[in-house]
Image (cartoon, coloured by chain):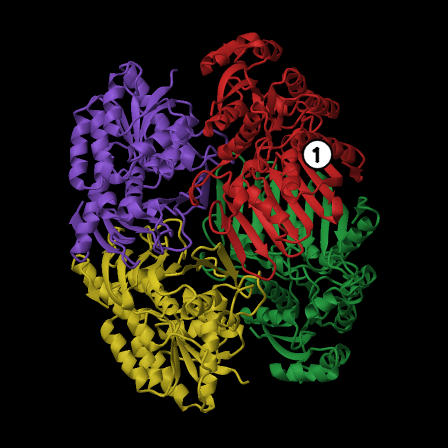
Chain colours: A purple, B yellow, C green, D red
Amino acid sequence: MERIRLGMVGGGNDAFIGAVHRIASRIDDRYELVAGALSSTPEKSQASGKALGLPRIYEDFKQMAIREARLKTGIEAVSIVTPNHVHYAAAREFLKRGIHVICDKPLTSTLADAKKLVKAAESSDALFILTHNYTGYPMVRQAREMVAKGEIGKIRVVQVEYPQDWLSVEQDFKQAEWRTDPERSGAGGSTGDIGTHAHNLARFITGLEVESLAADLDAFVPGRRVDDNGHVMLRFEGGAKGMLWCSQVAPGNENALRIRVYGETGGLEWAQEDPNYLWHTPFGEPKRLITRNGSGAGEAAARVSRIPPGHPEGYLEGFANIYSEAADAITAHRDGEKAPPDAHFPTVKDGLRGVEFVDACVRSSNRNSAWVKV
Amino acid sequence: MERIRLGMVGGGNDAFIGAVHRIASRIDDRYELVAGALSSTPEKSQASGKALGLPRIYEDFKQMAIREARLKTGIEAVSIVTPNHVHYAAAREFLKRGIHVICDKPLTSTLADAKKLVKAAESSDALFILTHNYTGYPMVRQAREMVAKGEIGKIRVVQVEYPQDWLSVEQDFKQAEWRTDPERSGAGGSTGDIGTHAHNLARFITGLEVESLAADLDAFVPGRRVDDNGHVMLRFEGGAKGMLWCSQVAPGNENALRIRVYGETGGLEWAQEDPNYLWHTPFGEPKRLITRNGSGAGEAAARVSRIPPGHPEGYLEGFANIYSEAADAITAHRDGEKAPPDAHFPTVKDGLRGVEFVDACVRSSNRNSAWVKV
Amino acid sequence: MERIRLGMVGGGNDAFIGAVHRIASRIDDRYELVAGALSSTPEKSQASGKALGLPRIYEDFKQMAIREARLKTGIEAVSIVTPNHVHYAAAREFLKRGIHVICDKPLTSTLADAKKLVKAAESSDALFILTHNYTGYPMVRQAREMVAKGEIGKIRVVQVEYPQDWLSVEQDFKQAEWRTDPERSGAGGSTGDIGTHAHNLARFITGLEVESLAADLDAFVPGRRVDDNGHVMLRFEGGAKGMLWCSQVAPGNENALRIRVYGETGGLEWAQEDPNYLWHTPFGEPKRLITRNGSGAGEAAARVSRIPPGHPEGYLEGFANIYSEAADAITAHRDGEKAPPDAHFPTVKDGLRGVEFVDACVRSSNRNSAWVKV
Amino acid sequence: MERIRLGMVGGGNDAFIGAVHRIASRIDDRYELVAGALSSTPEKSQASGKALGLPRIYEDFKQMAIREARLKTGIEAVSIVTPNHVHYAAAREFLKRGIHVICDKPLTSTLADAKKLVKAAESSDALFILTHNYTGYPMVRQAREMVAKGEIGKIRVVQVEYPQDWLSVEQDFKQAEWRTDPERSGAGGSTGDIGTHAHNLARFITGLEVESLAADLDAFVPGRRVDDNGHVMLRFEGGAKGMLWCSQVAPGNENALRIRVYGETGGLEWAQEDPNYLWHTPFGEPKRLITRNGSGAGEAAARVSRIPPGHPEGYLEGFANIYSEAADAITAHRDGEKAPPDAHFPTVKDGLRGVEFVDACVRSSNRNSAWVKV
């Protein structure tokens, strides 16, 4: 199978997430990175592209989209890994030229942009994949499959949280700077950057949408212009309730995304920092620890697992699963076929849900935590 | 030192908590149980008292209060371990006769009773001790001491939760029955029974009062008349924010009381089911695990610790600490002296705060989670 | 039921284990401490006895044995909590006068004494109970029951260890002093003090005796006269193999006694520092975490459990279980009856096995780790 | 930088470890797999090569070595991932033609082959890299660095173990078959397959060689021709002592490689299944949990880490670190330069040490666990 020709927008020298996307694209050998507009200035783009040995380097994403679309063996897909406020403008250029888009989360920095991007994606023949990467972890798939099969009964309560600590103090390096700038990050700080992950993970595992929420957002660090801590109560369709906590000021937490789901007959618990384990707690029985590819793990996890149990797969492998399922869909598209039905990846609609979540959090918090529709 | 002569109200044959109080009173050899009115009927009281070999058995608490007060070596203190709705009436009888009261939580089943009980305690010369027992754990004392010394800086965020699973289904044994009956338990179900523990623990460790809260309470099990799951957002005096979750319908959770406190310079984490450990996470340093009586543990924990590190002390020892600190105060009172300044035990005012917390949760939830003052 | 009248030998002011025995005897209200010869000199005995408010204080154990035996309501049982080298002489005095003996481990400091003590116990009508206290933990009982029921199949491999760190450096306080003195502790240092616990726990859970062993003992701290680290390979009757590690020089370990037992169809794992949990790992199924009094826990654990799951019982409760089962036997003996069949406590024979284990370790190590019979 | 042209011997369709090597080679984009002799028969080699889309497919390794050596842009390195007994013959062909060899462990199936392979490697200009992959984990590097810096003082005790459970019963799939066949695997079963990993990890972290050992090996599963459980006592140069346990019959263990190292002033603990954590336990201070790229982690770990703390890197990333450090050395060699001094990878000598370890285990066990030199 020929590798998918991939381009990249953003992800230059000092960007963390660009390197992650590049590794993720390589792990299963489905992509070859051949073009890029990696930085916000032509000079930096040139330098970053050379450092990676890219065959084709562009000054900006528009130039790249136009020229690649004309090449016979131009890129088939592009990864967009810029700050949030650029996602829409960049994605639009590629979508309208039939180039598949793999875009970092959150979808956009504003709700208006998110809605326009949905339209752009829907009116394009190209695919749109959002890298809500945590849905790629095998044991997250396992949890989703167990919920869908009714193994914990009808869901009553969801507890999801994503605490970090890196913004506990004022930080001035690049990652911190744009993520705390509402112009580039969006109206939500921790809610947008990591709250959206928690929200999406809850949706993915439970299969339920959040109908309304009540939020109390804070910016604890003096001078911070976006929230760095968010407390949110959730009401799901069908009557389940939840709590969501996101924070960037919780010392001792690195990327402590964790979800607990309780149904009428059992519970599930998963933590991102120890991703190869899933607790299953059927009511009235001993707790069970299911391990990736181990006893009790099912098909949904196995298909995104590479190695036997006890040899941990981590963040990059989970991320790679999104890329590889996108590759399944892209190669199927290449051949005019449908993607395999069990290939999951987050879509532009999931992205819209995320931006709506941030918008609802901000609206609710501004109205003293009144319940608002999502 | 002569043992304190102790009586007991409630705690008959099939009551769980009475046995706990009796063991707790014995561990440090400070009390001798000599009288009781252990059940709600004279026959059962007689039977339960005989089973324990009590020297003096009474038909009801009033009879016991009157007669013991007249004895030269009558009881000096009484443990009240009945269902909540009896606390006030029973405590009043002993307080007005100068007999010290050690009372189970929550203080009362109604806010009106709680206020009357505060007055009764204040107008009595006798002491009133509330067994919010989790404050007796050594590592809870350690956490409180560290917060007070500023070791995590000014507090920003508090996450506290107390999930259980035993009421995930309809239950009809005695413990379940009265705890889900609003007449006997009070307006709060999970909020009153375990939410008050979480609330009190947060107050105890942080030294901060909850000013207002927004609550979303549910009764998930069909037919249940009180909440079995509560989601609560907290606002503390001074600007700290918190979330509190209590649940009796979370399969896999036994008594999973857990608190995490984050300040400007560090965090603390403690879990009741593994009570001999305290995580301390100073920002920018490796996580530290402090163990009971181990390296890094301080005076406040040591004084309520009996044995060296690595030999776990548990629930009964923590409970005993409340009894033993009460004994310090009672023997000091005997001698007309002040209790030692480092002897902590929850008071009638802490009990009032707990009942106010339940009342606020119910009011807020009835008003669609509006913020209410506590 | 009348409390058993108890005496104590050793356990004066600065002894750690005496206080443990006293608390353990009180927890279930089965004993009343009424006499003691708590220290090695008459003056200290007097002072320690007064501090505890003992009704009858003796100058030494012999005086106590003689006089108590003559009293109408003299002690029925005595706890011997002296350094090891005194166990035999003290126990003999009480056994020959028909007073039950509850003795700390290891049984004696020499093999010769151990054999004499077995004879003394066998020729007495009184009971002899050895406080290998870890066998009192509910989840240890659970493990033993599961092995006996064949739930992990025929045993193949046993891994048991007991590392500590308190002797990593030269220590000069009293506890350290006698425990590192071969005259008082016996020929084994870590092997005698904690290795015997590990050995006894393996025997208790598996029901298998160690037939032979090969040991490599070290005294790492300069000047130390007994081993502070022991590596031992074990061969059990019936073909199972094992490893045993005991150490007092392993920084970061407090009382990290841990056992893992693997049979043909499953495994079990238990750790003393987190004693309310038992891992059960049936081959080909998810791991199961059984909790004290929780789902999946059986009768053997329940009968030595006081409180519901999720409220941890610890070291003192486990110790108390030995005392309370001894009390069952003692009160049965009082009435000329047999002890209940499910009351377990370690006996003088278990004590002999422990001293034989130490002796075998020392012999093997002296012969360059040759296999020796135990 | 041009990718290193890589070939592969072994690793056909149903081999687990071949896929691991391929992913590991891709993660950091330093290699391009261009040739292979992937199976033991020409037909299967052809099929497996086609399935991977390899440009050049060979019937056997000798043909591949001869032809590739003649090509102008033939392979620069070859991965040998066959069963153990083929390692020597295959490696020799490439080494003598100046093609670098990346070889799976253990080095060979016999000690004689191992010694010949050392000579072959020493007389070749090409590099030889052994994939003792666990040394590639960042926190293993962290541990090694801390030991080297004296942060735990002079080492006294090493506890290392590698239990698995997959061979608890008779298995007949291909992986199990050759690994339990002494002709293909070597005289050691669990000792060779996983004991060598444990032995190498202990050497790598402590910097100490095992001087002598005493082993007790068993084949518990009826009919098994090589050991499936090994108990080994270790004596290191300089006086440190150790225990090593390897097992394939310990239900509940997947790849539970774990090492604990205790020195005069502190301890370290690392477990492969949770590889992003390292416990550091300085004597007399609280335990510290160091996380990959987190606070307290140093240079040695950072240079083999790709992503920020809290996003776990796993087995494949650790394996990739060996490949990428090999790539550093290979590209330096390409340019006639020295490899960077901080690039570690296991060498042919490490491989020899491993085969000597297995040989010593077998010899000792055959002599009733006598101490033998390694």
Can you give x and y, in whole percent of width and height, for residue B265 in the image? 40, 61
A16 vs B38: above or below: above
Q: Nearer the viewer, residue D314 or B322?
A: D314
Can you give x and y, in whole percent of width and height, for residue A94 in the image? 23, 25
Q: Nearer the viewer, residue D348 or C119?
A: D348
Helix, strand, or loop for circle 1?
A: strand
Give the letter of the chain under mark 1.
Answer: D
Q: Identity of the amino acid at label 1?
A: Asp
Q: Which residue is situated farthest in the front direction here? A: A43
Q: Which quarter of the figure has residue D222?
A: top right
Residue wearing tag 1: D218
Can you give x and y, in whole percent of width and height, for residue D193 in the image? 63, 30
Q: In the rendered view, does C199 fall on the left or right side of C149? A: right
Q: Residue at x 65, y 15 (%)?
A: D93
Q: Note whether residue B134 is visible.
A: yes
Query: Looking at the rendering, in which quadrant would you find the N terminus of chain A?
Result: top left
A162 vs C254: above or below: above
